[in-house]
Image (tube, rainbow, N blue to C red):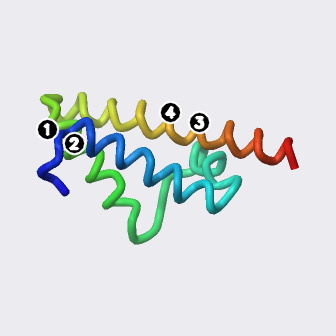
Amino acid sequence: PTSAPWDQRLTRWAHQIRDALRRYPGTAGWLLTNPPAGPNALVILETALAALVDAGLDDEQAAVGYGVLSSWVLTRCEIEDRDRMGSD
C-alpha cells in the first residue's frame, strides 16, 4: 500500500524484484545491459520513483536513486544466480 513509509515500500519493491528474478535465472544479468520492457516495466519504475520522491528527493535525485537501487538489486541477483549455478 502507498500508505506505508517510503523505506518499507522500497524494501518491498526490491524483494519483489528479487523474488521474480529468482524464478528466471539469468534474467538479472540480461537486464543489466538491456532496458526493461513489457507491461509492468513502467509500474516497476513508478513504484520506486514514488517512494523516492516521498523520501524527499526531487525528480532528478529520484531518477539517479532509481538507477543506483535498480543496479544494485540486479547486480545482487546476478551474483546469486552465478552462485546457484556454480553449486549445481
Q: Residues within 10 Å of mark 2 (few under 14, many from 20)?
A: many
Hey, what amino acid is under mark 4?
Answer: Trp
How many angstroms separate mark 3 from mark 4 (CA)?
A: 6 Å
Hey, what amino acid is under mark 2?
Answer: Ala
**Of the image marks 2 and 3, the number of the one nearer the N terminus:** 2
Label 3 sits on a secondary structure element that is helix
The answer to whether marks 1 and 2 mark residues whose Cβ atoms lie closer than 8 Å is: yes
Determine the residue positioned at 58% across, 43% down: 32
Q: Residues within 10 Å of mark 4 (few under 14, many from 20)?
A: some
Residue on which the image places disc 4: 72
How many angstroms separate mark 4 from mark 2 (CA)?
A: 17 Å
**Of the image marks 3 and 1, the number of the one nearer the N terminus:** 1
Image quadrant assignment for residue 22: bottom right
Hey, what amino acid is under mark 3?
Answer: Arg
Q: Which mark is residue 51?
A: 2
The one nearer the camera, 61 or 14, is: 14
The one nearer the camera, 35 or 62, is: 62
Q: Residues within 10 Å of mark 1 (few under 14, many from 20)?
A: some
Residue on which the image places disc 1: 54
Residue 64 lies left or right of residue 37; in this view the side is: left
Label 4 sits on a secondary structure element that is helix
What is the x, y in percent for residue 31? 57, 50
Q: Which part of the image, by quadrant, shows the N terminus? A: bottom left
Determine the residue positioned at 77% across, 45% down: 84
